[in-house]
Image (tube, rainbow, N blue to C red):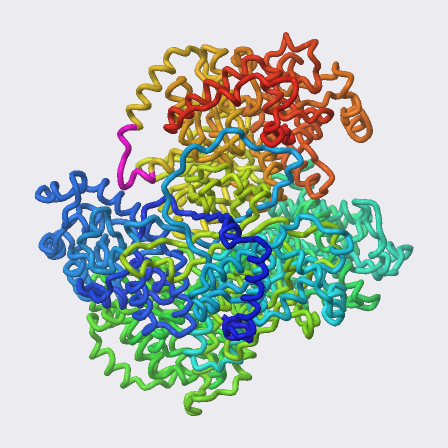
Amino acid sequence: MAAARGSRSGVSRAALALVAAVLVGCLAGGVSAAEIRRQKNVQVALRAKWAGTPLLLEANELLSKERKDYFWDFVGHWKELDKGSECLTAKCCVQKIVEDVRSLLSEALASFFEFSLTLRSASPRLVLYRQLAEESLSSLPVKDDALEQIPGNGPVEETCCWVDTGSTLLFNSADLHKWLEGSGKGDSTGQPELFDFDHVYPRSNITAPVAIFYGAVGTKCFKELHVHLAEASKQGKVRYALRPVLPSGCQASSSFCGSIGAADAVTLSGYGVELALKNMEYKAMDDTAIKKGVALEDPKTEDLSQEVRGFIFSKILERKPELNAEIMAFRDSLLSSTVSDTLEVWELKDLGHQTAQRILHASDPLQSMQEINQNFPSIVSSLSRMKLDDSIKDEIIANQRMVPPGKSLMALNGALINIEDLDLYLLMDMVREELSLADQFIRLKLPQNAVHKILSAAPPAESNSFRVDFRGSHVHYLNNLEEDALYKRWRSNLQELLMPVYPGQMRYIRKNLFHAVYVFDPASACGAETIDMILSMHQDNVPVRFGIIMYSSRLIDVIEENDGSKSEEDTSTLIMRLFLYIKETYSTQLAFQFLSNVHGSRSGGDDYSEEPVEAHHVEEAFVDSLLSGAKSHPQDELLKLQKENLYKQEAEENSRFVHKLGLYKLQCCLLMNGLVHESNEDATMNAMNDELPRIQEQVYYGHIQSHTDVLENFLSESSFKRYNPSITGKNREKRFVSLFASYHQEDSVLHDINYLHSHGTTDDVKPVTHLFAVDLSSKTGTKLLHQAIRYLMDGPNRARVGLLLYARRDSVSTILLMKDIIDRTISSFSNTEKALNFLHGLCKFYEGQHMVVSSAVGDSISTIMDKVYSLAAETALPVDDYRAWLTSFSADTVLKGIDKLSDFLFGQLGLEFGSNAVITNGRIFVVGEGDSFLTDDLGLLESMEYELRTKYIHEIIEEVEWTGVNPDYLTSKFYSDITMLVSSSMSVRERPSERAHFEILNAEHSAIKLNIMNSSIHIDAVIDPLSPAGQKISPLLRILWRWIRPSMRIVLNPISSLADLPLKNYYRFVLPSMDDFSSTDYSVHGPKAFFSNMPLSKTLTMNIDVPEPWLVEPVVAIHDLDNILLENLGDVRTLQAVFELEALLLTGHCMEKDREPPRGLQFILGTKQRPHLVDTLVMANLGYWQMKVSPGVWHLQLAPGRSADLYELPSKLVAIDSSRGKLIHIEVQKKKGKEHEDLLNAADDNHFQEKTDNKGWNTNLLKWASSFISGDASLKKKAEKNTALKDARQGETINIFSVASGHLYERFLKIMVLSVLKNTQRPVKFWFIKNYLSPQFKDVIPHMAQEYGFEYELITYKWPTWLHKQKEKQRIIWAYKILFLDVIFPLSLRKVIFVDADQIVRTDMGELYDMDLKGRPLAYTPFCDNNKEMDGYRFWKQGFWKDHLRGRPYHISALYVVDLAKFRQTAAGDNLRVVYETLSKDPNSLSNLDQDLPNYAQHSVPIFSLPQEWLWCESWCGNATKARAKTIDLCNNPMTKEPKLQGAKRIVPEWVDFDSEARQFTARILGENAEIAESTSPPSDAPKPDDKDLSQDVKDEL
């Protein structure tokens, strides 16, 4: 640490003297060391729900991310049983693993690996393998003699390793040997499925049978099977994949270090813990005393190496160990300085600047920033008394002219990171990618400065606007706004574009701003419709320049077949010829009218018939068009045209032009200034609106002026002369692969390629490399090969072509011969210009002969040989060489080359066998069977990849000054290879595209600058150190500095003038270290959050700040984590809590092509055997959906019912193999014939409800997943007893949900449950939102359900990242009551009642459950108004609410009914979220979130008003109506502020009995002595002294 090396790191005599003096002062003042040591601590741990995973296997998973071959190298190192035998502790084993890895990785990557290993980031991947292993064992038969070896009666050695062949399981090498020699040969049916994450043995035969080995390196059974499989794989007998698994019970058979971590729970890190100072104006403390604790491991001791007010106490104790007690007392005294949650206004004035100054003047600024913002309440007093340096303040204020005060930003190598979504795992993935890229580039001999330039350079933004350059003589314009007399009255001032107008109002400016050019076949129905639309819009004076490009669909087909050399005139060509004649001879207007008349003569009406247009229709339209103004008889002109073939060539050129542009595939389309749109009127108007802001921007900046040609301006800037959406599609649809790992393999295919170049460019550097993967045995492949040669013959000067030709092993020898001839020609003559001519002729011949199977193979070979000789002679290539090659031709030799090529194409690049593809600088473009892929498409691919991904890299590489590289190596091929490899590596880089110009900020006085010259990582940041973002970023920056040593520039940006304390909490970010691994045994402890010396008298509330994909819950916490008062701990020094990662999130966005998101679409997720474990539905909001999953391989599909009936979606495989969960995008489409059916209707999914049988959805998956290792038989017995009790209740189940947080409200919740059950004989199911329930409640509720005969389920929903977040826990709880009702419950649930936790029910809730809500999704009770004392507090009777409600009642949210079927059908949830998103950003709106929101939105989400007696509360209703009350709610009274416990006992007579019953039951279950007499006795008129402390009046959860 810098601090440890700085001026304060050593302990001078002066420092010791100061310590002694302070100690003397403390003790003399009567403060004993024992009293100071009364301080209390808080410790928090978070563990994974899954069982432990071996660190050795985790290490190998991490290593494989760097390079696949490293995985197998590591297996080779550790397969011996005695490996690591010298290690007797967990720490030694981890250090041994890291030591081995350092021999494979660079220093930076090895350091990163060590941190990732301590982070346990690969553990989820091993859980996934464990799931697949369980499925393998359970789904396949085994040999009879191995039946007894299957797990069940205890582990045996053989079950620790097995091989899955898809049809059987093999447990030993003898069986494996038999399978390889026998049934394994040629067995292609029923093979196990391989996934992208699988470890396939290098250079495995792609066509060989698949064998998946489940086992763990270091176990006794592993080595023998692995060696056998590896050898068989080298011989091509098997495709060997290894899935690392250490089954339960096999730890004893593993090597010394093989099982480290497997026996311990996986304790996680990478999250934050907050202890917030709670506002205790209203107290929420339960008066139930904690009677007994839970045995936990010893708390972590304080980290004495951390600086405290300038002292590092570990150093002091080293010097003066005999003063241990006194020194620690002094440290505690410093830490327990007055805790402040308020300051005077003048003290707040410069607090932000004072904090920045303290940080900047510290010897270790990063540590200082973390110490301040994570212990702010204890430090703020000293900060506010600092004397301020004006230079720091002035620079901060100057910077805040460019960045808002308090704004935090962060960039990694120039790319902005979204701080709100940032977590340690995401950051580590980003850093690993940058380090890995840097390592690759350095191995390519690129100097460090070039590496930094490449990694930091901003690639050109991939614009969403792809423009087609259609300029040319083939465009026929109808009008010209700048020249036609029709527009002379229009203004010409372009500045009017910047003036505001009414929505939808068009700007009539005499300038060709919008060029709407329509491309169509004039004989088609859509062509006829387009013409009429153009004429109509032109007549309406729409300010657009209209133009057309026509083509013949039939001629396009001919061109596709035979280049159009043999074409016959068709109707479309005739129309074009006549159009051109009329335009040239008469006028453009008349020519366009002629096109419209063609449709009129055919249909005679307004319907655009799909009937084909015939020649006589065209001739009739021609005559009709010219009758009025013809120079001669129209019939004579027609005969002359046909006789002389006038305009035939021009018409055919039109079609060739459209074919070259590629627009014919769209049939009819619009080009708006080159942007492609549909061709209808709505699309035209939308296209204008989309283009207008771009034109306004250009006008604003002066790029478009009165003399500017707008079309030229747009198309010359960025346009392409070809349209192919499969090439130009969104980045998400493109596929990229890095070629680096393949290039650096020994005997790499990439080293064998001889590239082809266009004529005269062989010695030029080619920034673009096309690799063609061609299956010579397919027709598509031979066409693609021919197009590649023709592309080069067209003369591209910045691209080269490499041919990777392959064929099936059973191909006829003629195909193999062709491959051999082409490869030898390229190898020997690629540098000669004549090679292309030879290959062109050979491809043309082969394409013509393809698939023609001769009866005699010898005849075919003879024909090919003759053709080769003649072509060689024609192109002046040496015929004798070809004769020699053909006589030495060997099919076996060619097949060996194909095997090597197959490993590259299908093993490394991931192509499917039999596919044809173009790999352009790492971008894989697969040409589908039957798809046309022409030279123009190749030109487009080249242009796109060069402009967007390669140009800037190529320019950097060209400027490199090479050192340590032999000048003879610096050839054009060297530069081309480097550009190809760097571009391909950068193409797979995942990083944000947004950037910020940090360099404009001043950084002389107000920035932390840590410059490391050779670092590949550069961090730019702007941080407000006194903000929640600053609390999270500080430890992340420190951990990066410790492990990676990046270059950093951190500009501090505190808010200059504060009105309140910016932070009112303590914060710890949990990070791993080597100390988590025992140095005495093989155990792994794991990291924890540790808060030392917390304030005793302040009430704290604990919050966990976890990564977005995590769902966590407390599992061990005997104290109320909502209301932590440490002075009540008694003799316990450390309050401990353990949380558990319950699930990870699978989220996504679902879209329907060209439509709104399919709201209400239902998905289910599960395994092959159990397809429905969880379900969810799609929101209208962004098409968002989420599911809770554990690591594993899952199948996602449409739910049975209307979703599956109306929509198509193949089952998608989803692999969850990291702690980051997964985000996926899904596009669905409706089935044919169902396009106009509505997904949501009144009879929605009745049989779906029957199938799901109202089973729980949140727990199914996790219960099932956790049963992999062991089951719980006791659950079955409890369920049987519970069923008997429930059978006593008859009728439809009443579903009730509620939410509680803190021990007091859980106490209320149990009373509410009892009151419901005592008043009904119907079955009841309770749904509890589990996010904030305590472990005690979750322990008690199953027993309570069993005792009282009800069902329950714990539900949750993770707050979506796109929805505005609440920061206060109470407001988050309110939000959960209303925002996610459509998605938090299983789809089978049709109705539910919300009942507040502090409510007492006095009637049968079945009456409310059965009530007819009159078709409304929600039913609430209006607020009472008969207690006149409260009139002044009825805000809804005045001001905004009175105007907004317009006579509607304002309802209370303590009790409401949700008709979930109607709620989903009417998209009520989506509407509520839209309203919430709009209102919640205003901090003054939605004061009572769960109540204000539905009342505000009741105009769009109607509410049924329940009769008043359904909810009574004393505050608003008064005692007159109490007797009729069906439920009583303990509302707060804003006048008296009576504590809720006291009010409950006074208002509700039966409450005391219910409370006594619930507490006695709880005490019995938890094994405590029930001492409840005191707290349950009726209160006297005057509160007891203790009541003041125990009372509370929390703002009601309404």
Q: Examine the image and state in which quarter residue 1097 appears.
A: top right
Question: Which of these two is toward me, 1311 or 523?
Answer: 1311
Residue 864, position as x, y percentages in the image: 28, 72
Residue 1126, position as x, y percentages in the image: 53, 43
Question: Which of these two is toward me, 1452 or 443?
Answer: 1452
> Which residue ends up furthest to the bottom in the rendered image?
967
Q: Examine the image and state in which quarter residue 1262 appears.
A: top left
Q: How many marks?
A: 0
Q: Residue at x 66, y 27 (%)?
A: 1501
Q: Is residue 416 above or below residue 968?
A: above
Q: Is 1265 on the left or on the right of 1029, as rendered? A: left
Q: Is residue 95 visible?
A: yes
Q: Is residue 558 visible?
A: no
> The C terminus lies in which quarter of the figure?
top right
> Which residue ends up furthest to the right in the rendered image?
489
Q: Residue at x 49, y 59 (%)?
A: 328
Q: Is residue 914 above or below residue 391?
A: above
Q: Is 117 on the left or on the right of 315, as rendered? A: left
Question: Which of these two is toward me, 340 or 418?
Answer: 340
Q: Let me know if residue 601 is in the magenta part.
A: no
Question: Which of these two is toward me, 809 or 1213?
Answer: 1213
Q: Is 559 on the left or on the right of 1283, as rendered? A: right
Residue 591, position as x, y percentages in the image: 73, 53
Q: Which residues are magenta?
A: 1265-1274
Residue 523, position as x, y percentages in the image: 61, 48
Q: Is residue 30 above or below residue 1096?
A: below
Magenta-drawn stretch, dominant element (helix, strand or loop): loop
